[in-house]
Image (cartoon, rainbow, N blue to C red):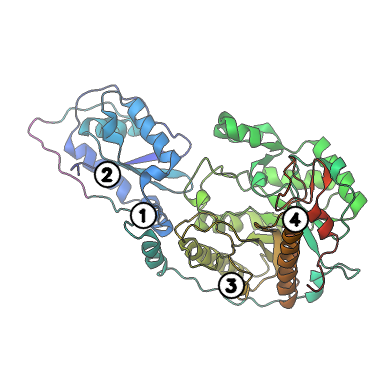
Amino acid sequence: MLSRVVVILISAAALSFAACTATEPIAAERTEVAKEEIVSSDRFISTVERRNFLGIGAPDQSEMMKELRRDLAQKNPGVPERDFANVDIRFSKTNYLLFTRTSIQAEGEIIRSRKGEPPQKPEQSQEPEPPATPEKAPKGNQASAIRKKLASYDRTIPEISGPRDAALTFTEDGRPHFIVNARLRNTDWNMIDPWIPSITALRIPGGSVAQYTWRSEADVPNWLMDHPAKRRQQTFLTDELIETYADFVKDKSTETYFCLNINDKLENQLKIIDRFAHFGVEFTHVEIGNETYLPKFALGKKEGLGFAHTITVDDYIEILDTWIPSLKNYPFKILAVTASRSNDGSPGDAYREVWNAAVFQYAAAHPSSIDGVALHIYLGGADDGGKSLEEKSVHSSDYAFADAFPLPLHITEAGHRGADWSPEGVEAYKNFHRELYEYLKSRQDGSRCGTHVLYNPRNQPGDPYSMFDVNGITPLGEAAKSFPFGEP
């Protein structure tokens, strides 16, 4: 291993380095001063803990790391690209802490670029001393290493006192609530016919797409608009789009759940809430973000659907603390995001446990701040041997992990990955939702059932989720008319 290591602090708002033009190496003292200045900072220590907490694997698994390596090589043409091959990065909400092994020349020039200082020549007699090697991510059995690390975190879910109203599981006329996720960006409302009367609420503007939904293009972060794939994913809530939705739900007499875009500014999201109210849509529930417990948010994976900036569990709690006081000025119920478990002992479950505990610990410390939690339940799916930190399906209908959740559950997305439009697939769909509903009803706290998704804009026969598509109502939509499906 090379003996020289440098720590470089890069602003999240500027992911590229300034070009380096000088060719002379710099003094050892200069490198050491910069290193100590950064290593001693609270931001650095916090970010290291978050990285190890998440159990990130080899650096080359991240597209962003690859981008940074390429950027380093481009901005330092005099340095062989191989010197940037072992770049290790740690993420926080607003900064990246980058560890790289390279020549002393490139190290000095990058540090001076950050500090805005001219290049300096060292005294010929000085010999740089190698700084300490940075802490590395777990090697070997990653799942085992992550479990060991997470064992030190508090995963206690506290009790939260307060009224629990079992009647809220049902509408005023006694029907069980049934929430359906609906994507505003691509739903053809003319195709939602015949209506499914068991649907009591629509959740808009969708799930992952909610994190790309803005009032106008002026609110979108610049890098998102510069990213071709992500530019196509943006949804802008024009008055026409809002009014079309308003007319639809007024006609169907359904409630509206709204998923906030926590990639946006709070003030912009409040304007969206007000604009819907202008057209007569008063949200009954507001969900703060969508599936932000998934590691793609904490790892800063730009390519991940719904990603626009890094969100760790600590960042999410900060968002709750910052946003909820303003949201409390509205009459709707506030839902925080919680995570389901795969029930297979995967390393992802350990992070989800910590996430859930943090949300409920916040709720206990701030009484009446959160009225319930949004939870997504997907049954089945490919098994990766428990090695993945990414999205995991629930592998059984055992929902005991949620028994300790001290607030009502609102299932704003759910589905059976093995369902299709065959008689057997439809029956699997019905059995899954029947069992989920029975569990929620048994909680006696006002928990509500839901599913994914109202409309699929493509012709995909056998799709395991869509209730409507370009051809009208699907077999799953027909089956949903009889929710909660009675006895098997």
Say what amino acid the circle numbered 4 marks.
Answer: Ser
* Residue 80 spot, x, y in % from top left: 26, 28
Are the residues at dot 4 and dot 3 in contact (C-beta closer than 8 Å)?
no
Which badge, 4 or 1, comes first in the chain's sequence?
1
Res 19 seen here: yes
Q: Which residue is mark 2?
A: 35
Q: Secondary structure at mark 3?
A: helix
The magenta span reads 123-132
Say what amino acid the circle numbered 1 marks.
Answer: Ile
Q: Is residue 74 above or below residue 262?
A: above
Bin the neighbour count of mark 2 within 10 Å (Cα to Cα): few under 14, some 14-19, many 20 and up: some
Magenta highlight: main SS = loop
Q: Is residue 73 left or right of residue 256?
A: left
Which badge, 3 or 1, comes first in the chain's sequence?
1
Q: Which residue is mark 4?
A: 422
Q: CA distance from mark 3 to mark 1?
A: 32 Å
The residue depicted at 78 percent of the width and 55 percent of the height is 476
Say what amino acid the circle numbered 3 marks.
Answer: Phe
Q: Which residue is mark 3?
A: 401
Q: CA distance from mark 4 to mark 3?
A: 31 Å
Q: Is residue 263 above or below residue 324?
A: above
Res 283 seen here: no
Q: CA distance from mark 2 to mark 4?
A: 62 Å
The residue depicted at 18 percent of the width and 39 percent of the height is 29
Residue 92 among those drawn in magenta = no
Dividing the picture into quadrants, the one containing residue 372 is bottom right
Q: Is residue 402 left or right of residue 244?
A: left
Q: Which residue is mark 1?
A: 45
Dividing the picture into quadrants, the one containing residue 271 is top right
Q: CA distance from mark 2 to mark 3?
A: 44 Å
